[in-house]
Image (spheres, rainbow, N blue to C red):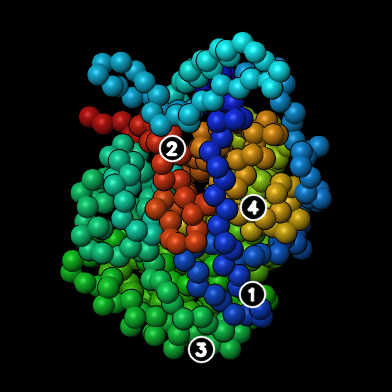
């Protein structure tokens, strides 16, 4: 079956939705040229304003409403339910399905009939996946996913050598990227790029160059989501990244440069000022890191926005949040011969990417959008609906050979980022998806 042809299944009723887990937002101001290093994405970002001529028009967002008129209204058709099916004493059963509740009107006197068990069908087989995930701590479910042999990349804040070794022993083909946390903030507009690069490398080398870790880590990030406001700041950041790429390469350590937040740099025309970093990364086998999120769905502000629950994606589609990377590569990096390998060091649904989007105004991670998705035709069971959206982004990544993979934020997330966490049922659905999208063996 072609992956763009959705298979329809019965849904879990709205009454079975799990409680929403709203986290407390870690407030932080991105003032001036200060780069704040967070445990993940999550700083309150203003809407990126297109200032160059993009392939895709920027989408004006509507005032948040309880039920957006921009989104499709659920009709009479059944909807897809993606739940993993597992063997239990020889019988196929649904793994970690939500509890179903029978309901009756207050006037009813008869005993209500029990709600039937939902009919769940797994994802159909497809091409090898490019999905991975960000981890902040060790958890057994990480290794259940790795055991599928389909996890393309893992970005980790947990730098324990034994943890790294176990990741590679479980899935040797998975690329492992490390990031120091916390790092001091930097003033990009006034920093000395070379001196800052040397200071960073001196801090990283005792960890990255340690013989217990070197065999397992494939690359290292530097500052997370650096904010640049103009060409001069972008040039300084490029010089910093180029120098740290060279210094680490002298020790045989790969760098993952950039790691810009969603929609950043806000002006696409700033990318040529980052070319020195890209040139150094190309010379020393480095990778580019980007973050891409959308909300209230992952399709928001892309060419597939407002096209329903199964919008599909083609190689020509672009976006201003997700699929933005195609504008960067097609308009700037490919013409310059700098289309180096790309890793999405964070991706997913994040309510902080934009201030005037549809959906609940206080929603942050994907868990906070479950009721909105149910009300607007994107799936009555949040975990399954979220993995469907991630599968859409996976399909886009597979269309671009230069993309190595992308990390869902997050699995086993840091404290205060729980609404982004896919531990539990969502990871179980992802496990089933990965199991039928792994590379062929033999």
Disc 4 to disc 3, C-alpha distance: 38 Å
Front position in the image: 146 or 221: 146
Q: Quadrant of residue 17?
A: top right
Dot 2 falls on a residue whose secondary structure is: helix
Res 336 visible: no
**Residue under numbered circle 4:** 363
Q: Residues within 10 Å of mark 4 (few under 14, many from 20)?
A: many
Dot 4 falls on a residue whose secondary structure is: loop
On screen, residue 137 versus residue 58, left or right, reads: left
Front position in the image: 351 or 5: 351
**Residue under numbered circle 3:** 192
Q: Residues within 10 Å of mark 1 (few under 14, many from 20)?
A: few
Q: Which mark is residue 29?
A: 1
Give the x, y percent position of residue 145: 33, 41
Dot 3 falls on a residue whose secondary structure is: loop
**Label 2 or label 1, whichever comes before in sequence order:** 1
């Amino acid at each position: 079956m072609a992956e763009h042809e959705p298979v329809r299944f019965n849904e879990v009723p709205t009454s079975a939705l799990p409680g929403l887990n709203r986290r407390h937002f870690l407030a932080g101001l991105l003032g001036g040229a200060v780069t704040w290093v967070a445990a993940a994405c999550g700083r309150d970002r203003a809407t990126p304003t297109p200032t160059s001529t993009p392939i895709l028009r920027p989408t004006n967002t509507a005032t948040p409403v309880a039920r957006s008129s921009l989104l499709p209204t659920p009709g009479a058709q059944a909807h897809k339910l993606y739940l993993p099916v597992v063997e239990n004493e020889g019988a196929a059963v649904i793994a970690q399905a939500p509890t179903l509740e029978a309901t009756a009107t207050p006037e009813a006197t008869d005993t209500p009939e029990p709600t039937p068990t939902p009919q769940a069908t797994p994802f159909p087989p497809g091409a090898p996946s490019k999905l991975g995930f960000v981890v902040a701590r060790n958890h057994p479910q990480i290794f259940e996913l790795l055991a599928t042999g389909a996890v393309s990349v893992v970005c980790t804040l947990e730098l324990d050598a034994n943890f790294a070794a176990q990741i590679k022993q479980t899935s040797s083909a998975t690329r492992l990227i490390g990031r120091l946390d916390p790092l001091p903030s930097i003033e990009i507009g006034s920093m000395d790029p070379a001196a800052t690069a040397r200071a960073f490398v001196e801090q990283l080398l005792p960890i990255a160059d340690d013989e217990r870790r070197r065999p397992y880590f494939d690359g290292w990030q530097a500052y997370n989501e650096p904010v640049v406001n103009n060409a001069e700041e972008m040039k300084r950041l490029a010089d910093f990244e180029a120098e740290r790429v060279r210094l680490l390469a002298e020790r045989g350590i790969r760098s993952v440069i950039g790691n810009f937040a969603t929609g950043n740099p806000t002006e696409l025309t700033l990318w040529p000022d980052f070319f020195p970093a890209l040139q150094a990364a190309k010379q020393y086998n480095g990778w580019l890191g980007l973050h891409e999120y959308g909300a209230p769905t992952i399709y928001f502000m892309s060419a597939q926005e407002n096209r329903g629950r199964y919008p599909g994606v083609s190689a020509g589609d672009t976006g201003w949040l997700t699929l933005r990377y195609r504008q960067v590569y097609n308009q700037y990096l490919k013409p310059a011969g700098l289309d180096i390998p790309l890793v999405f060091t964070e991706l997913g649904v994040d309510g902080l990417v934009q201030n005037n989007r549809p959906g609940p105004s206080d929603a942050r991670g994907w868990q906070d959008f479950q009721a909105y998705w149910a009300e607007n035709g994107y799936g009555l069971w949040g975990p399954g609906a979220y993995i469907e959206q991630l599968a859409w982004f996976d399909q886009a990544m597979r269309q671009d050979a230069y993309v190595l993979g992308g990390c869902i934020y997050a699995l086993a997330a840091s404290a205060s980022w729980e609404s982004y966490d896919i531990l539990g049922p969502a990871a179980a659905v992802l496990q089933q998806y990965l199991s039928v999208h792994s590379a062929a063996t033999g």
